[in-house]
Image (cartoon, rainbow, N blue to C red):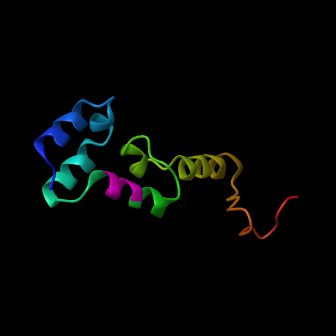
Amino acid sequence: MFTTSVASSMKGATGTGNRFQRLWAYCEKTGHDFYEAKDMIEERIGRNLICECELLNDEKAIRRRELRALYGVDFGLPGERHVDIE
């Protein structure tokens, strides 16, 4: 469980509390360690998070949708395309 000093220092620490307020609140409520939970999420999705909004707004997926709309082709991922350009 979190101690009051850790929780209060986290909320005042260089915006981390503001950028991950929902994850922080969830971890406090369930008794999980915030940093361990964040690390597990980052390992699972394969990239570092700057803000929890990045979980909802996947920049790569958004860019792929934009390219698909622009060119009418889904370029796929490297190695998973029907034709790879070298």
Position in image of residue 22 (x %, y %): 24, 47
Query: Does the stretch in magenta take in 38?
Result: yes
Residue placed farthest to the right in the image?
86
Position in image of residue 27 (x %, y %): 21, 54
Residue situated in front as seen by the camera: 35 or 64: 35
- The quadrant in which the C terminus is found is bottom right
What secondary structure predominates along the stretch shown in magenta? helix
Residue situated in front as seen by the camera: 28 or 6: 6
The answer to whether 20 is drawn above or below residue 82 in the figure is: above
Position in image of residue 60 (x %, y %): 57, 50
Relative placement, left or right, of 25 versus 86 is: left
Q: Which residues are magenta?
A: 35-39
Quadrant position of residue 17: top left
Task: Residue at 14% x, 56% y: name it.
Answer: 1
Task: Residue at 22% x, 59% y: name it.
Answer: 32
Residue situated in front as seen by the camera: 23 or 2: 2
Position in image of residue 40 (x %, y %): 40, 61
Task: Residue at 21% x, 34% y: name it.
Answer: 9
